[in-house]
Amino acid sequence: MFRSHRAPRLAASLASAALLLATATACGGGDDDTAADPSDDSAKAGAAFPVSVAHKYGSTTIKSEPKRIVTVGLTDQDSVLALGTVPVGTTEWLGGYKGAVGPWAADKLGGAEAPTVLKDTGTGPQVEKIAALKPDLILAVYSGLTKEQYESLSKFAPVVAQPKKYNDYGVPWQEQTETIGKALGKSEEAAKVVEETEEEIAAAVEEHPEFKGKSAVMATPYEGMFVFGSQDPRSHLLTDLGFSLPADLDKVIGDQFGANISKERVDLLDQDALVWQVGDVVKDAAKLHKDASYKDLGVVKEGREVYVNETGDYGNALSMGTVLSLRYVVERLVPQLSAAVDGKTDTKVEQPAS
């Protein structure tokens, strides 16, 4: 799977989340306040078990609080980290980060050792290497796990596969986090971190009423023009920000997270804002603007394009589209979208400083 597709006010919220996950809640009142026993958190989590989590291949029962978690889902590590747990193993998709943990989530490691990194080779999970980590839970929520792979992994640990009701790699970030929270016995914590990220997005929506009623789409120039469907995390973000997607997008895409479009359907790109994920902003923009089927679209002539370098932290965070990475993305993408839809053809859509 190619890397673009799989193969993505703030300081106060992050500080609040870190405090919640790193300290025990104070108990009692008045002069008799004392710090809660750290074991209270474990006891609370333990009370949630056994728990059953439904997924594409049935339902998995987790009998006790997992301690050794391996993430096979390409972005599942962010949800685990957001809930105050460090996986023993993660699956690397993009970025080449230590432990497969991006800069938007690195502070969640605390003083813990970085996870062992497994590789997404395009042929499925590295079963033997996963088994060697002796996991007591395997998470494959944001994945395309096959039934055979699920059964293979299930021989040595409970596996939570992708939800049945979405396309593979189509689970919304909210449900991804909530599903993982349930599996970890941390449903309340999951609801809290989801709420914090939703508040960041809601604040951006409130500050930019110009987004309402506008249409947008995300694409990448991979083997032509590849457009992301409504179930892709990139598209989820656009709709969360108040944009609508092209009316017949999924009719063209089918039951995939995205697909290449023909020259006859470049009209899908002609929206109020078009976000391109590219390998080189200057070179790829120039190449696109030479394409006879694309260069004369209104979105090009009126300067409504947004370019994101997919090989940097910003592009990686956008591709990941997680409860943690989206906070990083919103700070950078929202000003670009605002410039794109301001109705002024001479407004330049600037690249973020970092």
Image (cartoon, rainbow, N blue to C red):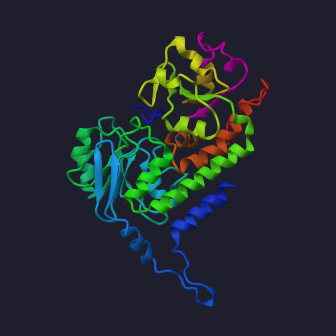
262 vs 331, left or right, is left
Rendered residue at 33%/65% (across/down): 49
Query: Does residue 32 show up?
Result: yes
Tell me the quarter of the image containing the C terminus: top right
Does residue 8 lie above or below 347 as drawn? below
Rendered residue at 64%/28% (across/down): 215
| Magenta run includes residue 95 | no
Segment tinted magenta in the rendering: 288-311
Does residue 249 lie above or below 114 as drawn? above
| Rendered location of residue 40, percent (x, y) | 44, 76
| Rendered location of residue 200, percent (x, y) | 64, 51
320 vs 136, left or right, is right
**Of all residues shown, which one is farthest toward the bottom?**
31
Does residue 211 lie above or below 263 as drawn? below
74 vs 314, left or right, is left
| Magenta run includes residue 301 | yes
Nearer the observer, 121 or 74:
74
Nearer the observer, 247 or 143:
247
Rendered residue at 55%/52% (across/down): 104
Tell me the quarter of the image containing the N terminus: top left
Nearer the observer, 165 or 103:
165
| Rendered location of residue 80, percent (x, y) | 44, 56
Q: Quadrant of residue 93?
A: top left
Rendered residue at 52%/69% (across/down): 22
Q: Quadrant of residue 293?
A: top right
Total labels drawn: 0
Query: Does residue 109 show up?
Result: no
| Rendered location of residue 12, percent (x, y) | 66, 60
3 vs 9, left or right, is left
